[in-house]
Image: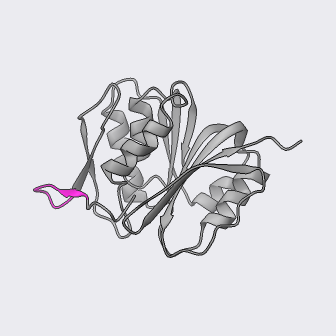
Amino acid sequence: MAKAKPVKKTSAGNGQIRLIGGQWRGRKLPVLNSEGLRPTADRIKETLFNWLMFDIHHCRCLDLFAGSGSLGFEALSRGASEVMMVEKDARVAQQLQHNLASLPLARGKVINTDAIGFLQSPASPFDLVFLDPPFHRELLPTVCQLLEQNGWLNDNAKVYIEREQASESLLLPPNWRLLKDKQAGQVNYQLYQREPEQ
């Protein structure tokens, strides 16, 4: 969900995202207009999934601030075994559910709840987590600590983080190792790998 490229508008006044790879490549999915909703720009998404090229197939993914679902749907298109999308806004979550139902045999689930509250529920570990929270809310430090402390990450899980360039340096669990780090416009995006604590 980036500011670098605005979501394309449709005649209905809403937007759409486009899947850029995998079995549903070229498929367009509608997105509701909602304050703070910034679908990840295609060029960032393409870079991210190039990074994940050998990791995405059969992995279990969590899209924690799902929004448009751009990252979660892309992961499903590219062979993820399961994607759980967490979205606080009820209308946006309903659109995610509608889009999920339109994709044949997609193994996904939409949960309409707050991300912090979700991470305080009983955990089921994931192989890959997408973190693209609303900008200027400083949610990432708390979310990252909860992911680590509450058992949401498998050994060697990867965590993608997208955030505003001007945000303060991010305090992360010490066993998260930075793999990739890039910038596009006013957006920083990074890929980390969790290393099991000895």
In this rendering, the answer to whether 113 lies above or below 135 is above
Total numbered labels placed on residues in the image? 0
Residue at coordinates 85% horizontally, 44% vertically from top-left?
A: 197
Which residue, as the protein is rendered here, is positioned at the far right? 198
In this rendering, the answer to whether 98 lies above or below 79 is below
Q: Which residues are magenta?
A: 7-14
Front residue (pair 68, 25)? 25
In this rendering, the answer to whether 35 lies above or below 45 is below
Front residue (pair 106, 51)? 51
Residue at coordinates 66% horizontally, 39% vertically from top-left?
A: 157
Q: Quadrant of the N terminus?
A: bottom left
Residue at coordinates 34% horizontally, 65% vertically from top-left?
A: 3
Q: Along the horizontal axis of the image, is 37 left or right of 143?
A: left
Residue at coordinates 28% horizontally, 60% vertically from top-left?
A: 5
Front residue (pair 99, 145)? 145
Q: Along the horizontal axis of the image, is 77 left or right of 52?
A: left
In this rendering, the answer to whether 127 lies above or below 31 is above
Q: Is residue 96 visible?
A: yes
- The quadrant holding residue 151 is top right
Q: Please name the predominant secondary structure of the magenta segment in the image.
A: loop
Horizontal and vertical percent for residue 76? 43, 32
Residue 12 lies within the magenta run = yes
Horizontal and vertical percent for residue 56? 51, 31
